[in-house]
Image (cartoon, helix red, strand yellow):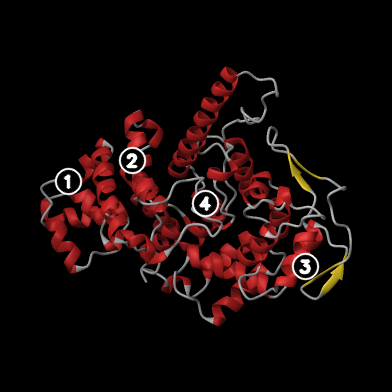
Amino acid sequence: MAEREKVAHLLRRATFGPTAEEVDAAESAGWEATLSKVLGASDPKLGPPVPSITSDPIDSLPREATGEQREAAGKLRETQTQMIYEWWLDRLVAAGSQLEEKIVFFWHGHWATSIEKVDSPHLMLLQHKIFRQYGQGDFSHFVKAMVRDAALILWLDNQKNSKRAPNENLARELMELFTLGIGNYTEDDVKAGARALTGWTVDRGTGKTRLDSSRYDGGDKTILGQTGKFDADGFVDVLLNRPASPRFIAKRIWYRFASGEEMNEATLHRLVSAYSLGKGLTTLMNAVFTDPAFLESRGQLVKQPVEWAVGAMRQLGIKPSGLAEADRRTLREHLQGMQQTLFRPPSVGGWPSGVTWLTSHTSQVRLRAADFLAGKAASATISKLSAAPEQGRADALARLLVVDAWTPRTRAVLNGAVKDVRKLLALGLISPEYSVQ
């Protein structure tokens, strides 16, 4: 594989969509230097800073608040909800550390929590900060922070979990969806795990959580064959020390960053070995990107709608916050139509993946979104594409969108639109070669 194809493949996986200039720089620097830069420490100044929301406007109201005050607080909450959505979409496009953003986006789908039920942009933003703080480090620290996270506790009803009335939701999903996977625990483990997670309460106004000892079950529990007076941290330790846990996490990371197809056992063994050295997620990402099977995974991932739209905006020179209010609303509606909205995963299982995104309905919405994005492309982008001779515009488009090559069928379609550059752009964005990377 040529050096340009290698670094382009890496950047397609590690970013939301590399620009042609980024691939040029990577090709010049070489594979090793590019990988080192991708995995390097992020610069928080490269991208819009995290908004400051210190409390929830409704839940912070005093009991004697008037109807007028409650109405004003409700409107402020709606404004905050739109603000964090537009902020994150803008940061996905502009962030200098694209891998960090992609990992945060991955964890948002993994610990799928929706503002629809949590009903607090403040709490959703606090959870988002946990993803940023722990998402590339020791997984055990990450999980222990998450079982104390206010948004996740409310999303899975763990604030209702007490020694007198155990609620199993968080314990079940912690094992099934977050750490072990289906088939690696029993119903008795769920019941005992729920007891370990009892007693946690949430102050919705401040977002702080605390353990209420009067509601906590401090008795012995037997979880996955181990017996002890396990609390939340002890429960997490039991889960993460199971052989199924590193295998589960390695598979999840591979599935989202490398290939939608199942990896072979040899690759899985290499990834688990890397991850198990301290449960380091950055180490695991390095193992994924350097595994021999990684370079063979081209064309095996379908872009999620957010990945598709953000990558297109990066390559077309579109900054979401630079759009007019009506255009920002249209962009949001297109993503809603493609059934992926930030901070609103559909269920605790997160968003679907693979060919699920290629239904006839979502394809029609994607076509309209592609027309919209092509119409908003930066003038410099349009000028650069227009400057290419008509017989070479399909190749110029491939370079712009970082597509290695067009199939003869796609090229024939593109060649029929070379006189209309914006139509050519839209066709490139909905092509199989761009949608499946």
Query: Mark 1 vs mark 2: which is more N-terminal?
Result: 2
Amino acid on which the number 3 mark rests in the picture: Val
Q: Is residue 145 positioned above or below 322 on the image?
A: below
**Callout 2 environment at 10 Å: few (<14), some (14 to 19), or many (20+)?**
some
Please state which of the two labelled residues, at mark 4 or mark 2, is closer to the viewer: 4
In percent of width and height, residue 76 lies at 54, 26
Q: Name the disc covering residue 311, or none.
A: none
Marks 2 and 3, how far apart at CA: 48 Å
Instruction: Assign the C terminus to one quadrant of the image.
Output: bottom left
* Residue at screen point 27% across, 40% down: 377
Query: Which residue position holds label 4?
Result: 105
What secondary structure is marked by label 4? Answer: helix
Q: Which residue is mark 2?
A: 317
Earlier-in-chain disc, 3 versus 1: 3
- Tag 1 residue: 421
Expressed as whole percent of the image width and height from the top left, the position of residue 88 reads 49, 40
